[in-house]
Image (cartoon, grey):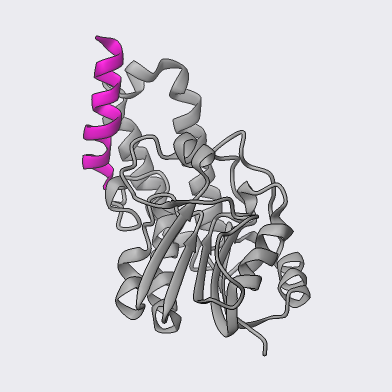
Amino acid sequence: MRIKFNSFISYTIIPFLTGVNRAPDVYITDGFYLNWRQMKHSMHKAKAYAKGICLDIGAGKAPYKKYLESNCENYIITDSEKTHEHMFKDSSTSFIVAEATALPFEDLSIDTVVMTQVLEHVFEYEKALNEAVRILKKEGVMLLSVPFIYQAHATPYDYHRFSEYGLKMLLQKYELEVLEWHYQGYLGTTLFSIINGFIWERLACMRSLRNSVLLPFILTIFTCNNVFGLIVDLIPAKHFSPNFFVIARKKV
């Protein structure tokens, strides 16, 4: 009975109250509202660059497809079967089973590559980036986001973090020209997203209580923290960004 109750709250009530099933269009009650808000803004800017055959690597539930697919001839989704099942147990998204390090596509066959929050989950991340560049056409575009100051997530499949300077060197190594660089939030997004995540994770040991009596209070705290985060983010402290979003073009 308790298992059914927790499942109902987790997969029906909480998504209804936070909008998590509509991500990135989540409500301000969601613990990761600030991060989703930044990704939403980034994708609106990236839409103009999407074209032709678009490959969304490690896409999960493919939350950004709705922003990009209207500009593409074909929108292809791939994901690792193992990590997809671990991270998205309630997902009904159809995808091609493929590891990011071994993509089943020909050289120079893709116009647009999307890799959002993927490289941190691939132990051989340079091999994955090399594969993405291999299949990308000359002057093709890559939409890439990676975490910098961000809590451990999708454990144990969380291996890396990327500084601004390390990521720029990595892009240069694989001959990707940066067209746009975005800091996805500053100290406000970083700090309050981590606090929200900490609260939710620490209460996991008493899940039934968290999903019932405490839930209204938790969502209220999340809402207040998200408002504070938006205010603190008015100070552009780029060295405290949680994520970077890059629009890059493959050099000829």
Q: Residue at x 49, y 68 (%)?
A: 234
State the image coordinates of residue 244 (x, y, percent, origin top left).
59, 65
Q: Residue at x 61, y 47 (%)?
A: 121
Q: Residue at x 27, y 35 (%)?
A: 14
Q: Residue at x 51, y 54 (%)?
A: 58
Q: Eyeballing the image, is 63 above or below 71? A: above
State the image coordinates of residue 55 (x, y, percent, origin top left).
47, 67
Residue 183 drawn in magenta: no
Prevalent SS, magenta region: helix
Total labels: the figure holds 0
Comparing 138 with 151, the one in front is 138
State the image coordinates of residue 17 (x, y, percent, origin top left).
23, 41
Q: Residue furthest top?
A: 1
Residue 16 drawn in magenta: yes
In the picture, the quarter occupied by the N terminus is top left
Comparing 52 with 116, the one in front is 52
State the image coordinates of residue 49 (x, y, percent, origin top left).
45, 83
From the viewer's perspective, tell me whether residue 18 is left or right of residue 130: left
From the viewer's perspective, tell me whether residue 67 is left or right of residue 160: left
In the picture, the quarter occupied by the C terminus is bottom right
Q: Eyeballing the image, is 202 above or below 27? A: above
Q: Eyeballing the image, is 80 above or below 246? A: above
From the viewer's perspective, tell me whether residue 141 is left or right of residue 43: right
Query: In which image quadrant can residue 129 be found?
Result: bottom right
From the viewer's perspective, tell me whether residue 228 is left or right of residue 13: right
The magenta region covers 1-19
Q: Eyeballing the image, is 150 above or below 196? A: below
